[in-house]
Every structure is written in C-alpha cells, then in structure tokens.
Image (cartoon, grey):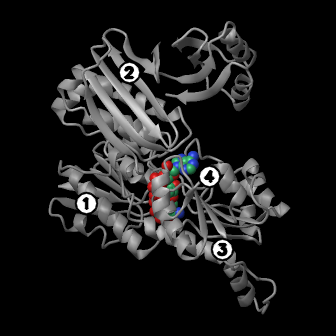
C-alpha cells in the first residue's frame, strides 16, 4: 500500500484517482508546521503540495520513504529540487492546469487597474458617491507589453488582442513566426519599456529575472505606465516600484505576488494606486481540479513504476542506454548552454550532428540534454523529460543528424543553432583521459574545457590585442584561469575564450568592448 500525504488544500475531486485507488492510502494534514511535517513524513511514499508547504532539506532528510513530491501548480520554488534530486526523489508539477485561470486573473487585474474598481468599491462602501475621483482609461488602442511569452503570457496576449490592444512581446524564446501567429509584435525589452501603456510580467523568478523591472527599467518606460505582476514576487523590484509610484512615473500597479508572502505591513499595500490580491492567480475551482487531477495521475504513475511526463528533475533513461550515454550527458548539456548564450536572439532551429562512435546508438537522450541545457538559461522547470516538448512549444525546430565527419575525433557532437539573423555552432568531444573539450566554435578550431565562467570575445587578430584584454581584466581584479584563441587567417577575425574565476560585472564588459579590436564580448556561464 502506497502512503500519500497531502499538506496543502487540494481539490477533493482532483484527488479522486488517488483516493479511489486500492493500492493507495491518502492522508490529509493541512497546514502542518515544519516540525510537525518532519514528525509526520517518515512513512510516506508521496507528498502532495501547493505553494504553502515548504519542502526543504530538513523535511527531505526526515522523508525516509519518499519517492515523489507532486506540486499541484507550476512554480516549484517551495521545494528544494536539487536536494530532492540528490535523494532520488522525483519532483512533479502540473504546468498546464492553471494557465488559463492565471491569465484570466491577470486580465481581471488589468481591467480593475484601468478602471480603479477596488478603490471605487472601497470608497462606495465607505459611504462616498465620488464619480470624478475614479475616472479610468480604456484598454482599446493601448499597448500591452508582455514580458515572458510562455503559457500564461501567451494567453494574456490573446485576450488583450480581443480587447483591441496592441501587444508587444519579449521573450528570449519567442520566434518571429510564433509571435505572428498570436498577433504579437516581437520586440526587445527596451522597445517594450518605451512603448507600452501597461506592462505585465510572466517569467519564472530566476537569476536573470530577479528585479528585471527595476529603477532603470522604470526610467525607460512611458510616463503613466501601469504595471502588473501575477507571476512571482521579486521580478518587479518592490522598492523601485514604490518610488516610481510616488514620483508619478507609474500610474498604477496590480500585484498578485510579493517578494515575501504573506506581505506584512507592506508600504505598497497602503498605496492608493496599488491594487492587490493574495496570490490568487491559480485559485479557481477549475484550475485546482485540473492541477490536482494532473498531479494525482502522475504521482500514481511514479508509485506504480509506470512512465510519467511532468518530472521537474528526473532524467529517466532506459538502463541499457543510460550506461552508454552517461559519459556524454554533461558535455551535451554544456554544449546546449554554451550555444544559446552566444546570442541574444530567439532560437529558431537547433540541429545536432553526431559523429564517430556516437553513431552507434540512440542519441535522442543526448539531444534532450542539449535542449535542457539551452532552455535552462530561460526556463526554470525544464528537465530531461520535458525539454523536447518545451522546445516545441516555443517553436524551436530540432533535428538530429548522423555524420561520418568526426574530424579525427573518436566522438563529436556539433550543435548548430539558427536565429532570425545568424547561424552559430559549437562542437565538443569526450577525450579519453582528458574529459570534455569544446573543439570548435563557429569556424574556429579551439581546445577548451567547458566549465565555470567564460568570456567569449570576438576580435580582430592584432599584436597586443590579447595583452590589452588581459590588462583590462587585471585592472578590474578578474583573474584569468585559462585562455584559448582561435583564428583562421593572420590578421583576420578571431576569437578568444577566457576562463575567469568569477562572473564579471557589466563595467568590465563595457571596458573590453571599448577596445578597438574587440567586436563583441559575451559572458557564458556553464
Ligand atoms: N499567480 C499565480 O498564482 C501563478 C499561477 C501559475 C503560474 N504562476 C507563475 O507565472 C509564471 C509564468 O508561468 P508559465 O506557466 O507561463 O511559465 P512558462 O515556463 O510557460 O513561461 C515562462 C516564460 O518566461 C520566459 N523567460 C525566461 N526568462 C526570461 C527573461 N529574462 N525575459 C523574458 N522572458 C523570459 C521563458 O522563455 C518562458 O517562455 C511563473 O513564474 C509561474 O510560477 C503564477
Ligand atoms: O498553488 C497556488 O495557488 C499557487 C500556484 C502558482 O503560484 C503556480 O506557480 O502554479
């Protein structure tokens, strides 16, 4: 009998598959404190949560029988996923079930914000009849900027179109074709900031999106812009938002999420032009049924040893194949990460070419690892299992090729990537006794250990160029651990890849870019 513990309020109807199963016992203990959860969890095989239960390392240490954690929703920020992975616990989510509800909530906030509905209601029930104070603005003819055109962002954009709004979309994975099919104009962030009347964020909260909307971003926006965050607290810098509201730069803000939840004595909640809800995006009967249904079904599959699809953390490769591909997995993931960081443009096509001994077996798991690496730079919940589906959903065309040309390497993986304006490629090999090497970047042969923080510099091959780069890094206290140079012709275009001990700051990149012979400087984090 499998024991399943439910610690957050989940729809009974959605849980029925589990409660009806003869081989499963479901126990509901809602709102346990951390210590009560630690005391309770030892005999359980599965844990089902929403966003309230914090599944941290202490809880996982106590969870001696735990095989799977099911998150009825999208974000898994309340679960220590690396710690679960270390302990061999599968973490599942329900990525699709609450998309429409959250998009509809965002739209409800957009309309409430434009017509001051919460403020007008408060005034009316307070005994006032004030029709002048709450004059709003129409949505028709206005521009909505959507940052993050994934599942929810796309649904919000579609609804905005129906209201006669123009929609600008920014997402590193938004291709021109997909944007066109939704009726959205694909733009860069600076244009989105400069031209939008309303800006709504729908990204995950990751390093790249933390305080994405900060004081510099507000400065780049239209006067009187209105801001919405129904994604994650922390994407919008709350202090900067307050300052922008107070200065009048921002006309209003609608928040469903906060940096610390629940927010206590929060100045934004007292601001007359802020409307807010307590993280209600996914709180509909339908969404809660869908996410509970989806996650229950998946948890049953894991417990019964059947195949499942929405794992956030588990590479489930058949044992025989796993043994053969295991040595190449890390290289494949790094090649994906590397190539995608070489450009700021949306990826349209990835072609992976396998040569040498890699021709002898099914390399599709390696292609998945390449996609996982590439997508992980922008999407939090990508893993081996869902990488292909996520790439497809983002309109990325993925192909695998076999090649006999291994350029004297016993094995060679070449990842070729196309964006709207450029073609890029990186090739890597596993060298017996030396490990992973990157051996080609675009047309340049190189011999590079793919790890840590790298600076990829395109430059003109000239005497002293390398020295000048080194001097600038040294003067900014950046230590160079290793360096590789590739060129085709003396005095022609060349590249350098420097391995540095720590990430560099924006001013170091700017200083390097001022050198006459330097064409571009790109940070690559592996
Ligand atoms: N308020 C709620 O109750 C609620 C409910 C569901 C989801 N969410 C949150 O909403 C967010 C979006 O969920 P989703 O299901 O649409 O996820 P998704 O993965 O489908 O979409 C996220 C998109 O953000 C893009 N992105 C990543 N980094 C970016 C960057 N730097 N700039 C611009 N775009 C970037 C990704 O490419 C991706 O397309 C998540 O944070 C999720 O946790 C909130
Ligand atoms: O469980 C909830 O209501 C929050 C869900 C939402 O934040 C998510 O990421 O899916």
Distance between the Cα atoms at labels 4 and 2?
Answer: 35 Å
**Ligand 1 closer than 8 Å to the CB at disc 4?**
yes
The residue at 48%/63% (across/down) is 182
Q: Which residue is mark 4?
A: 235
Q: Which x, y percent locates residue 375?
A: 44, 42
Q: Nearer the viewer, residue 448 or 343?
A: 343
User: Label 3's element?
Assistant: loop
Question: Which residue does the numbered mark 3 point to in the structure image?
Answer: 141
Q: Residues within 10 Å of mark 3 (few under 14, many from 20)?
A: few
Name the front one of labels 4 and 2.
2
Q: Is residue 110 visible?
A: yes
First in sequence, mark 1 or 2: give its number. 1
> What distance separates the C-alpha of mark 1 from that of mark 3?
44 Å
* Residue beneath the point at 45% across and 56% down: 178
Residue marked by disc 2: 428
Comparing labels 1 and 4, the label whose residue is closer to the camera: 4
- Asked if the residue under mark 2 is in contact with the one under mark 4, i.e. CB atoms within 8 Å, the reply is no
Q: CA distance from mark 4 to mark 3?
A: 27 Å
Label 1 and label 4: CA atoms lie apart by: 32 Å
The quadrant where residue 89 appears: top left
Question: Which mark, by number, is residue 381?
Answer: none
Say whether residue 304 is left or right of residue 43: left
Q: Height in image: 448 above or below 17? A: above
Residue labelled with disc 1: 297
Report x, y in % for residue 482. Answer: 55, 11
Identify the residue shown where x is 27% and y is 22%.
355
């Amino acid at each position: 009998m499998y024991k399943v513990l439910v610690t957050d309020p989940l729809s009974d109807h959605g849980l029925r598959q589990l409660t009806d199963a003869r081989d499963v016992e479901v126990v509901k203990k809602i709102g346990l404190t951390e210590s009560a959860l630690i005391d309770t969890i030892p005999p359980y095989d599965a844990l089902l949560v929403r966003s309230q239960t914090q599944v941290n390392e202490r809880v996982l240490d106590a969870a001696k029988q735990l095989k799977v954690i099911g998150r009825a929703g999208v974000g898994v920020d309340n679960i220590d996923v690396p710690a679960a992975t270390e302990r061999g616990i599968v973490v599942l989510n329900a990525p699709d079930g609450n998309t429409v509800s959250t998009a509809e909530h965002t739209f409800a906030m957009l309309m409430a914000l434009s017509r001051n509905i919460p403020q007008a209601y408060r005034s009316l029930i307070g005994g006032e009849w004030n029709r002048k104070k709450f004059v709003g603005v129409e949505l028709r003819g206005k521009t909505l900027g959507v940052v993050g055109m994934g599942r929810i962002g796309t649904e919000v954009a579609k609804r905005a179109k129906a209201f006669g709004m123009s929609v600008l979309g920014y997402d590193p994975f938004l291709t021109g074709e997909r944007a066109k099919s939704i009726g959205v104009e694909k733009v860069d962030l600076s244009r989105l900031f400069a031209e939008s009347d309303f800006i709504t964020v729908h990204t995950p909260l990751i390093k790249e999106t933390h305080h994405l909307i900060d004081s510099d971003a507000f400065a780049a926006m239209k006067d009187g812009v209105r801001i919405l965050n129904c994604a994650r607290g922390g994407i919008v810098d709350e202090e900067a938002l307050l300052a922008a509201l107070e200065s009048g730069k921002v006309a209003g803000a609608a928040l469903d999420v906060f940096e610390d939840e629940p927010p206590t004595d929060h100045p934004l909640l007292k601001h007359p032009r802020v409307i807010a809800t307590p993280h209600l995006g996914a709180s509909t009967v339908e969404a809660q049924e869908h996410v509970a249904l989806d996650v229950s079904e998946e948890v049953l599959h894991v417990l019964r040893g059947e195949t499942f699809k929405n794992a956030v953390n588990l590479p489930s490769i058949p044992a025989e194949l796993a043994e053969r591909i295991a040595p190449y997995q890390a290289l494949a993931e790094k090649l994906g990460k590397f190539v995608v960081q070489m450009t700021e443009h949306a990826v349209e096509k990835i072609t992976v070419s396998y040569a040498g001994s890699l021709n002898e077996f099914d390399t599709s798991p390696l292609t998945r690892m390449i996609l996982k690496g590439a997508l992980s730079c922008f999407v939090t919940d990508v893993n081996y299992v869902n990488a292909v589906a996520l790439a497809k959903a983002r309109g990325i065309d993925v192909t695998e090729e076999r090649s006999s040309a291994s350029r004297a390497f016993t094995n060679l993986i070449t990842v070729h990537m196309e964006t709207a304006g450029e073609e890029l490629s990186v090739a890597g090999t596993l060298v017996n006794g030396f490990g992973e090497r990157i051996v080609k970047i675009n047309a340049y042969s190189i011999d590079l250990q793919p790890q840590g923080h790298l600076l990829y510099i395109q430059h003109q091959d000239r005497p002293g160029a390398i020295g000048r780069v080194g001097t600038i890094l040294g003067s900014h206290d950046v230590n160079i651990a290793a360096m590789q140079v590739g060129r085709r012709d003396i005095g022609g275009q060349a590249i350098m890849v420097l391995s540095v001990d720590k990430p560099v700051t924006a001013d170091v990149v700017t200083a390097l870019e001022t050198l006459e012979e330097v064409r571009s400087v790109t940070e690559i984090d592996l």
